[in-house]
Image: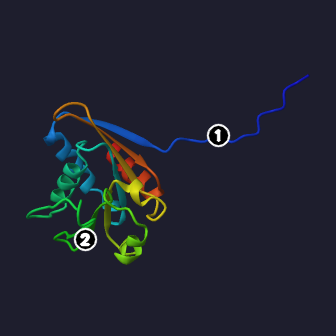
């Protein structure tokens, strides 16, 4: 008796890359490198990690690298904070931590925001699962110590694969 040949397909893992940032300066340098990528202008990035992992800190460094000045507030209570870079780039920083009702998505106009041009950054994206589009890049942060972070970027779309390839170059 011979075994039937395997007819299943091979599923490839999405491309990813991991950095270990020893301190906040190294995290800022990674954010600056990401900010230089032209494809970032239309990307949707999600940030994953426990409380205190550094999600908001990474977003602040990225916004600074894109030219945002002044106070950068966490959108924890407002759910979204809009920004505009000096070159006119619209940036939307979401924090879905307190997001509980899918009706908020429509009421707040999030569908329109995601349909418009610009960079979208979302902390706690799982709270809006099924409402937001697929992330171009998923950014997972893990605290390894007081200042050291492991940051893994995983591409979820063709745009994300391009961003990741440019960062790896």
Q: Nearer the viewer, residue 146 or 89?
A: 146
**Up-down: is 132 above or below 5?**
below
First reached walking from the N terminus: tag 2 or tag 1: 1
Q: Residue at x 40, y 66 (%)?
A: 101
Q: Residue at x 13, y 42 (%)?
A: 25
**Up-down: is 131 above or below 157?**
below
Q: Nearer the viewer, residue 64 or 46?
A: 46
**Up-down: is 63 above or below 87?**
above
Q: Residue at x 19, y 69 (%)?
A: 85
Numbered mark located on residue 89 in the image: 2
Where residue 27 sits: x, y (%)? 20, 43
C-alpha distance separating marks 2 and 1? 39 Å
From the viewer's perspective, tell me whether residue 86 is left or right of residue 162: left
Numbered mark located on residue 10 in the image: 1
Q: Nearer the viewer, residue 36 or 89?
A: 89
For disc 1, the neighbor class at 10 Å (few under 14, some 14 to 19, many from 20) is few
Question: Which residue is the extreme one toward the top?
Answer: 1
């Amino acid at each position: 008796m011979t075994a039937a040949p395997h007819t299943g397909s091979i599923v490839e893992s999405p491309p990813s890359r991991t950095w270990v940032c020893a301190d906040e300066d190294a995290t800022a340098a990674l954010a600056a490198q990401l900010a230089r990528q032209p494809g970032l202008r239309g990307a949707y990035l999600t940030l994953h990690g426990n409380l205190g992992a550094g999600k908001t800190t990474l977003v602040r460094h990225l916004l600074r690298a894109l030219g945002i000045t002044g106070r950068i507030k966490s959108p924890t209570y407002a759910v979204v904070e809009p920004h505009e870079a000096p070159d006119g780039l619209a940036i939307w920083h979401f924090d879905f931590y307190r997001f509980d009702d899918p009706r908020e998505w429509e009421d707040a106009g999030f569908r329109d925001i995601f349909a418009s041009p610009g960079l979208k950054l979302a902390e706690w994206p799982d709270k809006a699962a099924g409402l937001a589009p697929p992330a171009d890049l998923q950014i997972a942060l893990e605290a390894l110590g007081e200042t050291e972070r492991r940051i893994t970027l995983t591409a979820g779309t063709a745009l994300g694969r391009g961003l990741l390839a440019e960062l790896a170059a």
